[in-house]
Amino acid sequence: MLKRNEILETIEMVEKEHLDIRTITMGISLLPYIRATAKETAQAVYDAVCKKAENIVKVAEDLSKEYGIPIVNKRVSVTPVSLICAPFPEQAGLIGKQLDRAAETLGIDFLGGYSALVHKSTADYEKKFLLTIPEVLATTQKLCSSVNVGSSKSGINMDAVKLMGEVVKMTAEATKDKDGFGCAKLVVFCNAVEDNPFMAGAFHGVGESDTVINCGVSGPGVVQHAIEAVPDSDLADLAETIKRTAFKITRAGQLIAKEASNRLNAKFGIVDLSLAPTPARGDSVAQILEAMGLESVGTHGTTACLAMLNDAVKKGGVMASSRVGGLSGAFIPVSEDIGMIEAAERGDICLDKLEAMTAVCSVGLDMIAIPGKTSASTISAIIADEAAIGMINNKTTAVRVIPVPGKDVGQEVNFGGLLGRAPIMPVHDKSSDKFISRGGLIPAPIHSNKN
């Protein structure tokens, strides 16, 4: 339990430094609700989610008032829907739409789990399911989708990578009236985790309990403030400062998560330590890196600063809680981070530099707008590159890119709210078609053979 002085210190961080609990996410197993038909399953799923999560918004609001810590998002994640609809994959959309309806009924922000795990191979029912994603994301509001196409143990399923490039393009086209907004709700993973509370990649793993509460804390502004308070520190001392700050942030997150799980009759799952930025000034991971001594994020030294930041956050967090999990690192989404947005507008950061940064942070190429004319094979190649970083480094990586229909480099897309705005970033103009068309499996690295 937090001591009184820790609570007072936390409240000061809330008032002055943008500290918040970014999300309380309830994970719900849907396995007990599979029925004989898609229609019956969809109704059973809707009823179960509405019953189990009926108080999540109220509990979050009560806790926020009691402890003075904003809880920005209330979310639900469910068992990957591809598993629930395996007997009738072409009708998966019925379940997806009922899940979206449940999200609307509950008043939550997002519901994740319209997902598939195809990291080694793609079964026939999984392929049929993947092809439902564009239409389902185009006709729902709060439903999010994720697909795991690789792992350090199994390699990279390049057939799935090829298909997902096509799915991303189809999703953008299906939501072209909203600048391809459907792609903002779709993420492609390597080494996806079962207890991620963040969207769009959250799903409830089959190894989890029936109902679990996972909490995502966030405090880029707090970390930036702490760094700016020690302008003359060497890097070792700076890392210690970040560790102490992450410790405090994590303690607040654990308190809220435990209280929420008790009140919602759910297991306490994990606290995710990820520094998740917003478009608000003073709440930016990019500005943390600049406070460490970079003139602009994206310049030489950026990857080293990010590596140190990510490591220090993890070390501080694991000292504060024995239930650390999820992604737990520093996010570098372009559209959701004011420092990243401005660096991209200046041309100080590019797709290649962002890819290099993902080797040392969580999670990957995130919320990046690219030209609408970008080919499906190029998107697949971007996914393959990012999956390779995750596979070789035994870490979670992901791609959430938005090929904005009808827009090109020099233009901007604006999704509003926490999703922010982003300049359209260029991609390489040389073809990857032949590589992607080979298909098959990129074998797992030699260090995967650990048994």
Image (spheres, rainbow, N blue to C red):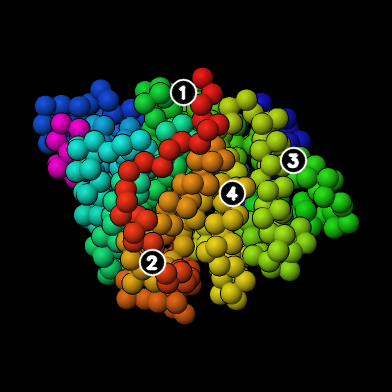
Residue at the image position 82 percent from the left and 55 percent from the top? 229
**Circle number at residue 431:** 2
Eye-nearest disc, 4 or 3? 4
Q: Secondary structure at mark 2?
A: loop
Label 4 crowd (10 A; few <14 / some 14-19 / many >=20): many
Q: Which residue is mark 1?
A: 267
Instruction: Tell which tag, 2 or 4, sits nearer the viewer.
Output: 2
Q: Tag 3's secondary structure?
A: helix
Q: Which amino acid does the dot numbered 1 rest on?
A: Lys
- Work out whether mark 1 precedes mark 4 in sequence or the reverse, and give the earlier one: 1
Nearer the N terminus, badge 1 or badge 2? 1
The residue sitting at 53% across, 47% down in the picture is 389
Residue 335 on the magenta segment: no
Q: Quadrant of residue 65?
A: top right
Total residue callouts: 4
Q: What is the C-alpha distance between the residues marked 3 and 2?
A: 44 Å
Residue type, mark 3 in image:
Lys
For disc 3, the neighbor class at 10 Å (few under 14, some 14 to 19, many from 20) is many
Q: Nearer the viewer, mark 3 or mark 2?
A: 2
**Front-lying residue, 249 or 152:** 152
Magenta residue check for 91: yes
The residue at the point 64 percent across, 65 percent down is 298
Query: Residues in magenta?
Result: 85-95
- Mark 2, residues whose alpha carbon is within 10 Å: few (<14), some, or many (≥20)? few
Left or right of 284: which side holds 161? left
The three-letter code of the residue at mark 2 reads Ser
What residue sits right under mark 3 in the picture? 243
Q: Is residue 343 visible in the rendered structure shown here? A: yes
Q: Is residue 288 above or below residue 42?
A: below
